[in-house]
Amino acid sequence: MAAPEQQAARFEQDDFPGAPRILFVGDANSTHARAWIELFDRTDFNVRLFAMPGAEAMAPPADLPFRIYVGKPGFTSCTERRMPFTPLGARMAEHEIREQNLGGRKPSMIDKVGWVANSIAPWRRDEPCHQALAAWLSAILRRWTPDIVHSFGIYPAGLWFYAARHTFGVTNIGRWVLQTRGGSDIQLRRFDNNRASEISVIANEAAAIITDNFANITYMAEMGVDRSRFASINPVPGTGGIDVDALARGTEPPSRRRLILWPKAYEVQWSKALPVLEAIRLVWHRLPPCRIGKPV
């Protein structure tokens, strides 16, 4: 075999043969996604991530140790921990389209899940790459047969996964865990009847729904989501949890630490970040020694 095929064969080998398999679907550059997956570092679960192309279509960070299917167009580096769409994933996608008797036409959500087409469009008919990625995801589900599929956010991962699994007929593979994004998934969309219906249909198909606040449960129930779908452990932090043991191993008790906590440190330069930085700069000489941190 050529080098890419050898690496692909190693990628397909589970670290823990026979142990449960979890496939995450979402943005590989999300700190929440990374934190969730890292919860399984010291377990015997087989964990992989299907990395959807984000707004910047960036490749996953090189330091992520888990196996990742990379949906970034143009990413071709195949390793024991990275499976690229080009060319290996594309071959699987082509085979999936043929096997599903889709002929030469491109799989589009309008054919199988028409009501989703008027939404934000997890893929559009003028984006063949995204359509092929959906076929690749379907092929992965058939080949690897994960026990659990965990999607990060209703938009776009949950909507995209819903459309893909219906287009290619893989609704019976894996139990689907749908995680919502704070309030951004639902807070405003609940006032749009089309979006509310969309969320209800998607959420009622999930085996379990995870959210980090009780308001989302109320909103989704009002949209018609069956309350039995909500996981009993709700609310769950967006990162999946907190490593209490690691916190306990701190070098000094919290009462002796000097820390400025900045919850929205990821905001960009044209938002509220600049005034905050300027305020800190102006009084820095008056502050005791400290550091600035943000929640993960």
Image (spheres, rainbow, N blue to C red):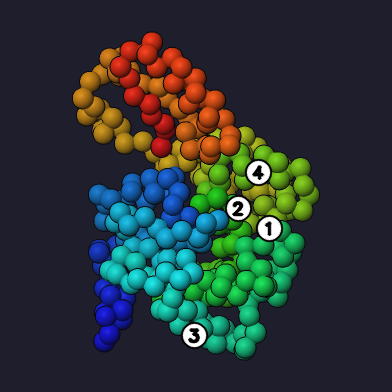
Which secondary structure, mark 4? loop
**Where does label 3 land, which residue?**
95
Q: CA distance from mark 4 to mark 3?
A: 36 Å
Q: Outermost residue, right direction? A: 193
Q: CA distance from mark 3 to mark 2?
A: 28 Å
- Looking at marks 3 and 2 on the same chain, the residue that comes earlier in the sequence is marked by 3
Q: Which mark is residue 155?
A: 2
**Nearest the eye: 194 or 265:** 265
Q: Outermost residue, top direction? A: 286
| The image quarter in which residue 248 lies | top left
**Where does label 4 land, which residue?**
186
The 10 Å Cα crowd at callout 3, few under 14, some 14 to 19, many 20 or more, is some
Residue at 71% x, 45% y is: 189
**Where does label 1 land, which residue?**
120
Residue 70 appears anywhere in the view: yes
Which secondary structure, mark 3? helix
